[in-house]
Amino acid sequence: MIDGVCVKQLKVIPDERGYLMEMLRADDPFYQRFGQVYLTVVYPGVVKGWHYHKLQTDHFVCVNGTAKVVLYDRREGSATNGEVNEFFMGERNNILVTIPVGVLHGMKGVGTEPAMIINVPTHTYQYDDPDEYRVDPHDNDVPYDWAARDF
């Protein structure tokens, strides 16, 4: 696992009315601070990424559909520099993934419906000076291929 990445198995509480799923709590050991909450949607077969942040930590939960979320550690001096983590998140794998500062990340919609990801970053988005740094999803030095793999 990339240094600083945390995976939390989410608690789903069902009853006859439906269900409730806790995502992020202030008493989680990895919780830092609250910035904002937003929803991002990725269509089936589409790649959104790569990008990274210099200030904020992200907390991803896929609440609808399935997303392949991939992380790449290219932080100089990191004990896990060069490591790739791949997570299939969604209704059949209810997890929260913490993405540390400086770790490249991206997502691909897999399956037949859009994947909806809730993110709770530690900082608010600054429209005049965004903490968002992009890397082309296909033309780069990241040792990862977004193509589907038939095993």
Image (spheres, grey):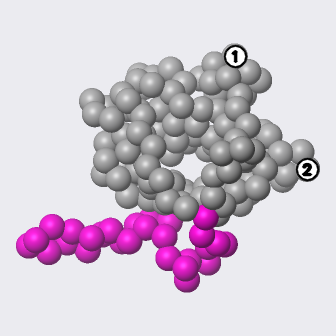
Instruction: Name the quarter where the C terminus is drawn.
Output: top left
Residue 137 as seen in the image, left or right of residue 119 = right
Mark 1 lies on residue? 139
Secondary structure category for the residue under label 1: loop
Which corner quadrant of the image does residue 94 belong to?
bottom left
Q: CA distance from mark 1 to mark 2?
A: 24 Å
Magenta residues span 6-35
Indicate the position of residue 111 as horizontal and vertical percent values: 31, 32
Indicate the position of residue 12 as horizontal and vertical percent values: 30, 69
Image point 55% across, 62% down: which residue? Answer: 36
Image point 38% across, 30% down: which residue? Answer: 43
Indicate the position of residue 41 as horizontal and vertical percent values: 41, 39
Q: Amino acid type of disc 1?
A: Asp
Indicate the position of residue 25 as horizontal and vertical percent values: 50, 76
Q: State yes or no: residue 29 in magenta.
A: yes
Which corner quadrant of the image does residue 52 belong to?
top right
Q: Farthest residue toward the left?
A: 16
| Residues packed near mark 2 inside 10 Å, few (<14), some (14 to 19) or many (20 plus) | few
Mark 2 lies on residue? 77
Q: Farthest residue toward the top?
A: 139
Q: Is residue 137 visible?
A: yes
Which corner quadrant of the image does residue 16 belong to?
bottom left
| Residues packed near mark 1 inside 10 Å, few (<14), some (14 to 19) or many (20 plus) | few
Secondary structure category for the residue under label 2: loop
Residue 13 as seen in the image, left or right of residue 148 = left
Image point 33% across, 35% down: which residue? Answer: 114
